[in-house]
Image (cartoon, rainbow, N blue to C red):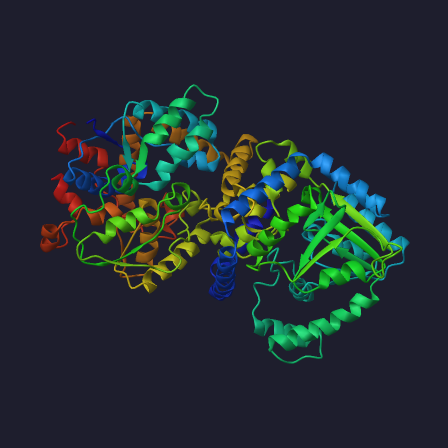
Amino acid sequence: MAKVALFIPCFVDQLTPEVGLDMVCVMRRLGIEMEFPEEQTCCGQPAFNTGYWNDARPVAERFVRIFRSAEQVVCPSGSCTTMVRNFYPELLAGTPWHEEAIKVGRRVFEFSEFLVKVAKVTDVGASFPHRVAVHDSCHALRELHLKHESRELLRHVRGLELVEMPYSEDCCGFGGTFATKFGAISAAMGDAKAGYVESSGAEYVTATDPSCLLHIDGILRRRKSTVRTIYLAGILAQTASAAERRAQPAATKCVR
Amino acid sequence: MSNAAHEFLRSAAEKSADLAHRQIIRRGIDSYNAANERGRSRFLDWEAARLRCQEIKWEAVNNLDRYLLEFEQRVKDRGGQVFWAENSEEARQYITDLATARGVHKVVKSKSMVSEEIHLGPALEKLGIKVVETDLGEYIVQLRNETPYHIVTPAMHLNRTQIAALFKEKLGDVDTDDPQQLVAAARRALRRDFFSAEMGISGANFLVADAGMIALTTNEGNGRLCTSVPRIHVVLSGIEKVIPRLQDLATLWPVLATAGTGQPITCYSTLAGGPRQPNEVDGPEEFHVVLVDNGRSELLANVEEREVLHCIRCGACINACPVFRTVGGHSYGTTYMGPIGSVLTPRLRGLNEFQHLSYASSLCGACTDVCPVKINLHHHLLHNRRDAVNASDRPWSERIGFKLWRWAVEDARRFRGAGWLARLGMRVMHRLHLDGTPLDPARPWNKNHAAPPAPAKSFRALWGKRNGND
């Protein structure tokens, strides 16, 4: 079977590499062969969402060129997956890359979607004895229609207590450049979200999008909250033996 | 940046920090959500109803010329008058001229967002004509000299105590915070106005082409009084409100009510189609319909954006919008607030002045999810942004920023270098405790967030290390 190509979003690559490493760790445990096309950089979403379609277009074309030969592509972000699957067809309409973009889009999967719907796995053999709440990241929820996949995976984690927080489907306020252009609004939305997270009694909040978590984490820590954020793969990467050794981030173990 | 953008940023920042406001709105939206969920569950198939409404509106909007002329003809056949107003000024002029010619002293209005859009109230008041809003919510905001906070629930931002204090001050004959008594006080005051006004002005939820009638929904019966008691009835409506057939109301009316308030149907559903006929016992002596374009034809000509005209003004997208709930309805500074306002206003009133509204969204898509006529609202926000960039009036720093971004991401080595530099910068700022200060390039992020840790190595470096490359 061909290797699964890793699509690592630009900010994950540069700012939260553990997100990618944890995903690799889980997939490796499941015996999935992976490759990382090293030419990849960014899917173009920042420019596209800000209206710079002419700058986003060549970047999108570049992405399609790099991933066109991959049979399956997995991405640890619902938002970046949405960009390729749902927005490339419109962005690249009328270019020679249009058809190819549609084909690539059909082969790109968000991580939890890939595990549950493609690899048909719900128990990845993880152990994480904590109370965890799920924030429903907007693009995974509304553009990719993913909600139950991440919860299904979490329900099979040993020792994990899944708690529902109020308004889990409310946007956290990240929204890409929105967070910097409209900082006050974004922070207030994040603040409301942080309040809901805290009220759930969870020790951790997780999501299908590490970008939401980057935002929520920055707000939680500013509030001096004790709740921590952890990307879905960060939980699924933890096994019983790692939990015993405590505080050893799964990612570190997997890589070194 | 336009004045409107400055004012939006200022007001939005103020409201965002107002926790009492956040709580009032949360409570209001919670009760809406509960009612709306019950309402949708009464439909055998809510999704099918949405689809049907989308089809009806598509048919209407894509044959607008035909259906509007049909509507006009039938209204005229029954002795009504139809005036086509190209812009706000023409619409205002027609109504103020009419009021002057007929010696009108008092006008009662049932809710019409188009009247807000064309600033009709102030124009009439300038002529010494008293204008009374008769929708309870609008009556309340009028007493406060405010514009509607929300197109369906104009006084959503006020709690009972505030309304009690307002009524005590303005109406005099009431000193209670009991909702029933407060409503009764408003009713007493409004009855006098209904029976002394010479002109009633209403909006229209739908203009029914094959019947030549307007369809009007209210919950307080004020619409019916405005359209039947005064001598003159003026209907003010956008041209996009026309629908082909009377039978379309069978779907549109309950869907509008459910999406708007969660009701199966609003308490009063009124059809009016002309002055009092010889065999009728009540109704106005004169019936005028003012059809307002005000930029809508331009939107109609834009194939990509045309479906925005499908909007039935139910307010569901506004309730679903987390930005609206944070900044409140008045911060927008526009007639239409929330997602539909952010899509529509830049199109109707200029991309230059109002493009900031298209950017003031996290693109969460909650609006698109709830729209009963399935307008792809957040995609239209993206189109507005694209057109704003192509119309050449974005800040130069942003333009250069994205050129640099493109230069960096079109080559993996450059991307790696840029990332390395950014992480180095973050570590330096952090080491010097400068996170979030004016010296910090990441200040726009770090002033609102605890600074994220900057990892020493990127994913690609760690992957390469593990897999033996590099």
Looking at the picture, how far across and down is residue B395, in whole percent? 51, 37
Judged from this view, the residue extending furthest toward the top is A96
Tell me where residue B230 sits by quadrant. Answer: bottom right
Q: Where is residue A133 shown, x and y percent of the image?
A: 30, 57
Residue B394 appears in the figure: no
Residue at 35%, 36% in the rendered image:
A81
Residue A206, above or below B401: below
Q: Nearer the viewer, residue B194 or B210?
A: B210
Q: Is residue B274 left or right of residue B447?
A: right
Where in the figure is residue B194, as x and y percent of width and height?
79, 66
Q: Tell me what residue is drawn at x 27 percent, y 38 percent.
A: A114
B136 relative to A238 in the view: left or right = right
Vertical order, B64 against B110 (above or below): above
Which residue is at 45% across, 53% downward? Answer: A184
In x, y percent, where is residue B72?
A: 79, 41
Q: Is residue B108 left or right of residue A61?
A: right
Q: Nearer the viewer, residue B99 or A252?
A: B99
From the image, which quarter does the N terminus of chain B lie in?
top right
Residue A117 visible somewhere in the drawing: yes
* Res. A210 image quadrant: top left
Q: Is residue A5 above or below residue B193?
A: above
Q: Nearer the viewer, residue A250 or B46?
A: B46
Q: Is residue B403 above or below residue A161?
A: above
Quadrant where the C terminus of chain B is found in the figure: top left
Q: How many marks?
A: 0
Position of B292 with respect to B339 (left or right) is right
